[in-house]
Image: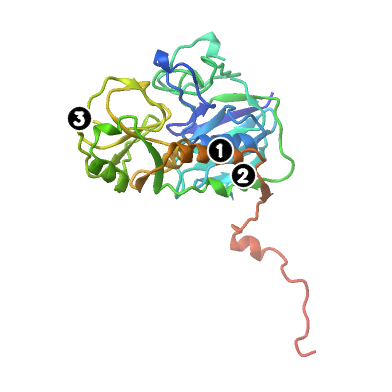
Amino acid sequence: MPALVIDSAGPGITLQDGGRHGYLRYGITAAGPMDPLMHAAANRAASNALDATAIEISTGGITVSAEDGAVGLALLAPGFRVALDGVPLPDTVALALEPGQTLVVRAGDAGAWGYLAVCGRLDVAPVLGSAATHTRPLAVCGRLDVAPVLGSAATHTRSGLGGLDGRGLAAGDRLPVVEGRTPDGPPQRLVAPWLDRDGREIRVVLGPQDDYFAPDQIEAFLAGPWTVSPRGDRMACFVDGTPLRHAKGHDIVSDGVAMGAIQVPGNGLPIILMADRQSTGGYPKIATVIGPDLGRLAQVRGGASLSFRRVSVEEAVAARRAERDLLREAVPREPVIRTDFASDFLLGLNLVGGVTDGRA
């Protein structure tokens, strides 16, 4: 059975499917992808179900190879640097990874998250039947399966749920591919310009506790600008700026939180809760990021500036429907045009087809 082998993996590289839904009442958060649209698009490009398990790649980067047969891959990592055996590739690409080849994905000039989907299904069960959580990278010899936990393979490392034994991927992990498919021919560029999203303005719906802030503080929140802090992670995005003032204090009776909920704690600096958020929170939530802008926000790196724009629920629903429509069709492909030829390679080619006498 073909397998994808992890040769190296930086921090924050995990297996994620569409998320673990329906258990928030029990204190179990959904996890799932930081950029749901890009995750779904990678699966669409691989001809998988939109919520299938894929590898989420952080700026820590990853190196993978294939064993026991070729593995078809669809990579969407705009802004990252990608190379196959040292030859640069587009950051959105479909390819067949042959045994002996190495695919490297590294942080580039932009983007915080990328997604690598296999053309087929990652066969994923607890290691040796154990659900124990390992705090160090685990290398195994032979088959490493990943079984769904509460119906999902999404990795939530803080609680040790899902993925490979509840942890991030590490060098030596082997991911068997079931019902694999490999594209014919050389690598092809995946054409998805709609993934090039501007993260400088994030759309929000006010509430549910916007009444804890006076109108001038609502306007200050929307006006910004806010600077994304580098200390964010899969749990939350922190922003810095002029602190907001609470009108009714900074504590509420704890209630459930959704991905994108924007809490304002006692220091007045908003915290946007992301995929690995806690299940409940006791700070007032001034607004909630709309679903289609969650990935847009997740891709903003620390140090960048952004602002928030208020939209209605109807506008948010329309944006969600437009996003859904983007995923109805296959992701187009086009040939990869190489422009990285070294001068000694070009000088070694016969680029002259003949000679004529210019006087004739």
Q: Residue at x 60, y 33 (%)?
A: 117
Q: Earlier in the sequence, mark 1 or mark 3?
A: 3
Q: Residue furthest right?
A: 360
Taking the image as shown, residue 211 lies to the left or right of residue 132, namely left
Taking the image as shown, residue 18 lies to the left or right of residue 309, namely right
Q: Find the distance from the CA under tag 1 to the CA under tag 2.
A: 26 Å
Q: Residue at x 22, y 28 (%)?
A: 250
As drawn, 352 above or below 273: below
Q: Say whether marks 1 and 2 touch (CB < 8 Å).
A: no
Q: Position of residue 262 (x, y in %)?
A: 34, 33
80 or 359, which is in the foreground?
80
Instruction: Give me the disc on residue 93.
Output: 2
Between disc 1 and disc 2, the foreground one is 1
Type of the residue with mark 1: Arg
Type of the residue with mark 3: Lys
Between disc 3 and disc 2, the foreground one is 3
**Quarter holding residue 157:** top left
Q: Residue at x 23, y 25 (%)?
A: 251
Instruction: Give me the disc on residue 248.
Output: 3
Q: Residue at x 61, y 29 (%)?
A: 4
Determine whether the residue tagged by mark 3 lies in a helix, strand or loop.
Answer: loop
Q: Say whether marks 3 and 2 touch (CB < 8 Å).
A: no
Q: Position of residue 346 (x, y in %)?
A: 65, 63
Q: Find the distance from the CA under tag 3 to the CA under tag 2.
A: 51 Å
Residue bearing mark 1: 321
Give the quadrant of the C terminus: bottom right
As drawn, 104 above or below 14: below
Determine whether the residue tagged by mark 2 lies in a helix, strand or loop.
Answer: strand
